[in-house]
Image: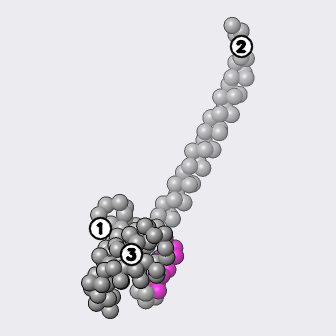
């Protein structure tokens, strides 16, 4: 096996270069951490939406932050939906479906049809669930 001999001056010079590079990286990391902290302070606090109830709280906090900018709740919800689609989707997905809507989903999946056609078919096959659905949609 070959042995590599390093000149002590080369080793010292290379060590100095590496130490300088480490200092530069540490300074850059410190700058990035400061910028991250500034951004975190500027954003509304969003909760982890994986815990039960937190998706609604996170969405609500985002809506409230938009409303604090001077808009109505409806406009704030629209803005949050556009800016944070994941937060909006989590809230929408959590909403319970009615028994009629569940029948519609099954028909759509089984028949591979559009939602409107599935609703028409579900209305005919499940008139009681449809009537209940109509009463609660008003």
The one nearer the camera, 87 or 72, is 87
Mark nearer the N terminus (2 vs 1): 2
Q: Residue drawn at (43%, 77%), measured in percent from left and top?
A: 118
- Helix, strand or loop for disc 3: helix
Residue 59 image offset from top left, x and y in percent: 39, 73
Quarter of the image with the C terminus in it: bottom left
Instruction: Relative to 21, say whether 30 is above or below.
Output: below
Q: Residue drawn at (49%, 76%), measured in percent from left and top?
A: 114
* Residue named by callout 2: 4
Dot 2, crowdedness within 10 Å: few (<14), some or many (≥20)? few
Residue 41 image offset from top left, x and y in percent: 45, 66
Mark number displayed over residue 53 = 1
The image quarter in which residue 32 lies: bottom right
Residue 135 is left or right of residue 118, and the answer is: left
All told, the count of numbered labels is: 3
Mark number displayed over residue 104 = 3
What range of the chain is rendered magenta? 75-85
């Amino acid at each position: 096996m070959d042995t590599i001999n390093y000149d002590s001056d080369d080793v010292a010079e290379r060590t100095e270069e590496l130490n300088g590079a480490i200092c530069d990286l540490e300074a850059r990391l410190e700058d990035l951490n400061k910028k991250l902290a500034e951004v975190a302070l500027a954003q509304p606090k969003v909760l982890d939406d994986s815990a039960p109830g937190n998706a609604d709280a996170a969405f609500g906090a985002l809506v409230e932050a938009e409303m604090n900018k001077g808009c109505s709740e409806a406009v704030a919800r629209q803005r949050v939906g556009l800016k944070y689609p994941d937060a909006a989707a989590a809230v929408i997905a959590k909403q319970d479906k009615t028994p009629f809507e569940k029948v519609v989903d099954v028909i759509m999946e089984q028949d591979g049809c559009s939602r409107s056609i599935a609703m028409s078919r579900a209305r005919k096959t499940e008139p009681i669930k449809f009537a209940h659905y109509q009463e609660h949609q008003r």
